[in-house]
């Protein structure tokens, strides 16, 4: 709680400082660094659990319920049926449509649930079960799995000596990455296990920084074998690893080892189905449901925003749409990936090389996933979580204001989803909290935003507030029932496109000799 | 204006408190809703007679007026809240309204702490960071977070009035302090625990402390009496005038309760009852087939009488005598010769008084430990001695830990563990006496005792419920109260020594 950030007062020079950084600098001044990490972890646990007291997707909304019921239903089928039936069983009722690692996770949680109370996961009989105890169990599994995968990855990454950050800045970055509101609200409010997938991605970034490329490949395979959405990162990871393979003297050997690692990891996870091509095809069909259409619901990507003007879905047939989306996506992510590949291949070995490469990788992960979010086929509004993960890992690289603002925009873009789940209160608390923590839109965390940007931030905040107020107070005109959601989509999409351009620009310029120092690691003030 | 860090304390505290809205709430929630309804919908003369709900009005009149004021807002918010027959009403709007009243009324504590710190800094200057941390630790303590914002009560507001009264005393405004304290007594009569400290202080410091002869002393005494009587008359007068004095007394002092609450508060009687149970068990082991344990064991009795198997019974008069005897150190702090009797001594005496009453009172509730810890927080804010800091650490960890059984659901388990651990970590690492942190000041046994709460939590909250649920359901709770009672008793001795012997 907030006895953190108590005592920068009495020190006029530090007023107006980012409160998170201020709290950790204060701990440093008090010689109490030992409690920094435990306090961060306990506070993020507290916030997560408090959010989980509120609503979730599809609560009390039978007969189909929502994402919560889907996850619970998978525990039910994986614990009761042989693996051969997992991707076939009653597909109309939340058939399993995530890759095998999610299925294994469901099986593990289901096995624990069966030990505690078999009625929570009884086959068919437990559909729509929403008892208090079963809800607590489900919430606890999210916390436990996130604590097992995501939290240690973030903590370890920001402890790495190869990142040149002062102690307080590392702690502040850890704090912000753990308490990023979108992830907290979607996982612990709406109910999903994105923390696991994103945790594997952060592990991959961590291993890249340690130059353990095989481990990086394995971690990334785990990520997309948990949720296929992690493939948004695939071009960046591929470009990074390929550059490593063509550069070093042992490149060919690394290439073989990487190939074996990928095939081995994916193969091991497909082991239960590996003998039957029909089964493998079924998994593929379930995991990549092309037939669902260009986008789902209302999502702040280019296709949905453009639909206000051009109804692409009625103009083109499905096949053309897929081709169009794929071409646009490729065009969008290629510059960043090619730049990453060339920059790493050209790199001279040295102490700075690993840190620079990791920095480029994080930019490229952000740009690629943002490209996929904006242009690819069948995007969910929740997929904005993917670009946010590498973005928060850039907190130490002088991107304070941009990342803070991106998180704010992302949170705004998912508010219709959160409000459907009855998460008004947590949304407002975390939105205001994040704005206050990162001093958005008033003041950035470290390198000050240029004055025009700061003014623009105020304007956008006003627009967001206006849309919120109108949504709450004025019923939309009968002819345009989705008016406010469409406004949200348009505004968010415009912001995401702007961020996409900005972060591409940053990736291309961040290693230039002149630019390297400018934002740089946070300066340590006396 | 608020400083940036004060805003941060308020903001982050409010964030967690707002998120806690859907958490468990006790029957106190319906108690207060019912009081809102009674004061809003019934004429004054029926307030203390209304009995449609079992949760009759049993706080003094000023608190009833407080509910009356809130009820005006409640009627605008959702008129169904204030309907007397709408028993058990707990719609989302009702929960939001009542949780919000706790959040807003707690600001009294925040303002009072600010004022007290400013006054304290003039008397005993210390590092400003220390004062702000101590105040933030009081404001965000697990006591208020768990009891007010989850369990549901208005302790933040009530303790705010107490701190406000102490702040007035620290500023040298004795009459104002007396008036505020008299008002506090009419808000909740449990504060009569600390009345002896105020009584002695006002007599020595205000009446006999000033200059002038007997006539002026008499004049000051008259002024003091007039102020206190004015407050009491304003609060109690209307009901006495209606001829309800007897009914009011019967509602405020229900003497039919037992020595210990269902969960023994961590005080001397908990140790006494535990000793009795242990002796009884030992006797049974030694002589199998002897008389079985008494039917109304203290651990089972909800509100009933506490019977003893081996040790002599404790009548209410005995607890009264013990409490009065235990007030001796508190009065000694104020009455020592050749020692000053200033407002800091008043705060010390208030701490010792509340502590003594907590240890030896009749039917003490574990929540009353907040009465000790809030004023003690003020003393920790201003250049505390290492001993005071040590006792504060032991008492706060043990006292707050004893509050955890209030929230018995599995849903609140992570909340109470995280809140208490966060608070303890910050308190032990950030409060300091001179250069040394509280943790560095502690002796080895004290550190072991504090760390021992972690295995105690594992045993009492995680292991025991499944292990002893059938045969010995009370054992985990008894274990908690005995373990925490040891710390509470130890801290009382240590605090008395520190306040009496240190310059």
Image: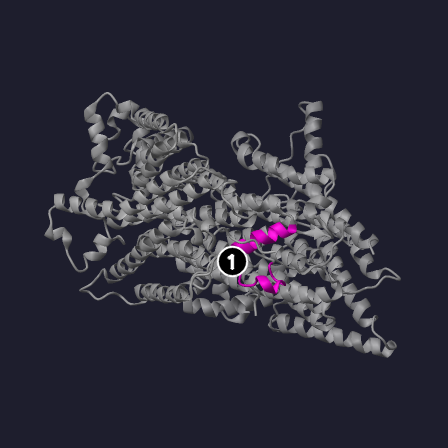
User: Which chain is disc 1 placed on?
Assistant: A
Q: Which residue is mark 1?
A: A18
Residue A103 location (% of width, % of height)? 32, 31
The foreground one among A312 and A140 is A312
The crowd level at tag 1 (other Cα within 10 Å; few <14, some 14-19, many 20+) is many
Q: Is residue A140 left or right of residue B308?
A: left
Q: Quadrant of residue B183?
A: bottom right
Element carrying mark 1: loop
Position of the C terminus of chain B, as image quadrant, is: bottom right
Q: Main secondary structure of the magenta part?
A: helix
Segment tinted magenta in the rendering: A8-30
Q: Position of residue A130 (x, y in %)?
A: 35, 42
Quadrant occupied by the N terminus of chain B: bottom right
Labels in figure, total: 1
Direction from residue A327 to residue A224 in the image, left or right: right
**Image side of residue A273 versus residue A385, left or right:** left
Q: Is residue B3 visible?
A: yes
Image coords of residue B412 (percent x, y): 49, 45
Q: Is residue A26 magenta?
A: yes
Question: Eyeballing the image, is B160 above or below B363?
Answer: below
């Amino acid at each position: 709680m907030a006895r953190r950030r108590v005592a920068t007062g009495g020190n006029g020079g530090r007023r107006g400082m980012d409160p998170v950084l201020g709290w950790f600098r204060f701990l440093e001044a008090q010689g109490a660094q030992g409690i920094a990490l435990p306090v961060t972890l306990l506070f993020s646990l507290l916030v997560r659990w408090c959010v989980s007291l509120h609503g979730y997707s599809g609560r009390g909304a039978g007969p189909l319920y929502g994402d919560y019921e889907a996850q619970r239903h998978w525990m039910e089928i994986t614990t009761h049926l042989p693996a051969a039936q997992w991707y076939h069983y009653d597909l109309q009722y939340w058939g399993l449509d995530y890759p095998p690692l999610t299925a294994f996770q469901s099986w593990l949680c289901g096995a624990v649930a069966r030990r505690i109370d078999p009625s929570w996961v009884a086959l068919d009989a437990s559909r729509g079960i929403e008892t208090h105890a079963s809800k607590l169990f489900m919430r606890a599994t999210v916390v436990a799995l996130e604590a097992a995968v995501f939290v240690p990855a973030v903590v370890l990454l920001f402890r790495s000596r190869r990142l040149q950050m002062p102690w307080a800045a590392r702690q502040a970055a850890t704090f912000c990455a753990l308490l990023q509101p979108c992830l907290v609200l979607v996982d612990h409010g709406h109910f999903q296990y994105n923390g696991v997938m994103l945790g594997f991605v952060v592990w991959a970034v961590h291993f890249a920084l340690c130059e353990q490329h095989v481990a990086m490949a394995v971690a990334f395979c785990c990520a997309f074998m948990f949720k296929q959405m992690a493939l948004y990162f695939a071009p960046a990871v591929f470009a990074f690893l390929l550059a490593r393979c063509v550069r070093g003297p042992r490149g060919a050997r690394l290439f073989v080892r990487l190939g074996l690692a990928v095939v081995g990891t994916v193969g091991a996870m497909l082991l239960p189905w590996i003998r039957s091509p029909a089964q493998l095809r079924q998994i593929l069909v379930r995991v990549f449901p092309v037939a669902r259409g260009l986008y789902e619901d209302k999502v702040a990507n280019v296709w949905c925003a453009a639909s206000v003007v051009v109804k692409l879905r009625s103009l083109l047939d499905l096949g053309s749409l897929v081709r169009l989306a794929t071409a646009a996506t490729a065009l969008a992510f290629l510059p960043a990936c090619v730049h990453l590949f060339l920059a790493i291949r050209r790199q001279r070995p040295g102490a700075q090389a690993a840190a620079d490469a990791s920095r480029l990788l994080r930019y490229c992960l952000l740009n690629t996933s943002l490209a996929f979010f904006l242009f690819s086929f069948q995007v969910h509004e929740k997929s904005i979580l993917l670009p946010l993960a590498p973005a928060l890992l850039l907190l130490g690289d002088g991107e304070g204001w941009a990342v803070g603002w991106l998180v704010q925009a992302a949170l705004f873009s998912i508010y219709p989803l959160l409000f459907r789940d009855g998460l008004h209160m947590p949304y407002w608390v975390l939105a205001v909290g994040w704005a206050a923590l990162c001093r958005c839109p008033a003041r950035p965390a470290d390198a000050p935003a240029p004055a025009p940007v700061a003014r623009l931030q105020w304007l956008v905040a006003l627009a967001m507030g206006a849309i919120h107020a109108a949504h709450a107070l004025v019923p939309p005109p009968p002819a345009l029932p989705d008016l406010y959601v469409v406004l949200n989509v348009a505004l968010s999409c415009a912001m995401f496109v702007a961020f996409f351009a900005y972060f591409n620009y940053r990736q291309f310029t961040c290693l230039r000799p002149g630019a390297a120092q400018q934002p740089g690691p946070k300066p340590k003030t006396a | 204006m608020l400083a940036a860090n004060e805003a941060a304390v308020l903001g982050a505290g409010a964030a967690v408190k707002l998120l806690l809205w859907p958490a468990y709430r006790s029957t106190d929630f319906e108690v207060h809703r019912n009081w809102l309804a009674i004061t809003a919908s019934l004429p004054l003369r029926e307030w203390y007679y209304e009995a449609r709900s079992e949760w009759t009005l049993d706080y003094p009149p000023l608190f009833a007026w407080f509910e009356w004021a809130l009820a005006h807002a409640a009627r605008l918010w959702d008129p169904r809240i204030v309907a007397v027959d709408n028993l058990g009403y707990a719609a989302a709007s009702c929960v939001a309204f009542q949780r919000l009243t706790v959040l807003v009324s707690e600001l009294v504590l925040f303002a009072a702490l600010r004022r007290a710190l400013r006054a304290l800094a003039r008397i005993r200057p210390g590092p400003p960071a220390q004062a702000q941390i101590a105040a933030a630790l009081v404001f965000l303590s697990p006591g208020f977070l768990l009891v007010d914002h989850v369990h549901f009560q208005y302790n933040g507001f009530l303790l705010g009035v107490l701190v406000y009264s102490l702040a007035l005393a620290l500023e040298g405004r004795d009459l104002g302090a007396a008036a505020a304290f008299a008002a506090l007594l009419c808000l909740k009569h449990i504060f009569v625990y600390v009345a002896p400290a105020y009584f002695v202080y006002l007599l020595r410091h205000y009446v006999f402390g000033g200059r002038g002869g007997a006539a002026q002393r008499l004049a000051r005494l008259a002024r003091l009496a007039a102020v206190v009587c004015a407050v009491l008359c304003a609060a109690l007068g209307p009901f006495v005038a209606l001829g309800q004095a007897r009914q009011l007394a019967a509602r405020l002092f229900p003497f039919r309760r037992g020595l210990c609450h269902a969960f023994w508060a961590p005080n001397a009687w908990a140790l006494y009852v535990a000793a009795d149970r242990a002796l009884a068990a030992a006797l049974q082991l030694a002589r199998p087939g002897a008389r079985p344990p008494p039917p109304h064991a203290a651990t089972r009795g909800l509100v009933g009488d506490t019977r003893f198997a081996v040790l002599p019974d404790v009548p209410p008069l005995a607890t009264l005598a013990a409490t009065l005897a235990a007030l001796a150190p508190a009065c000694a702090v104020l009455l020592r010769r050749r020692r000053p009797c200033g407002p800091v001594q008043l705060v010390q005496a208030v701490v010792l008084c509340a502590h003594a009453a907590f240890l030896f009172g009749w039917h003490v509730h574990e929540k009353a430990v907040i009465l000790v810890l809030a004023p003690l927080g003020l003393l920790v804010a201003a250049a505390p001695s290492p001993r005071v800091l040590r006792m504060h650490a032991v008492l706060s960890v043990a006292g707050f830990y004893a509050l955890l059984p209030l929230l018995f659901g599995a849903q609140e388990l992570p909340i109470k563990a995280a809140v208490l651990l966060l608070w303890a970590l910050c308190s032990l690492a950030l409060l300091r006496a001179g250069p040394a942190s509280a943790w560095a000041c502690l002796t080895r046994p004290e550190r072991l005792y504090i760390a021992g709460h972690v295995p105690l939590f594992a045993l009492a909250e995680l292991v025991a419920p499944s292990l002893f649920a059938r045969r010995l359901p009370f054992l985990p709770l008894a274990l908690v109260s005995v373990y925490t009672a040891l710390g509470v008793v130890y801290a009382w001795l240590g605090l008395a020594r520190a306040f009496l012997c240190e310059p």
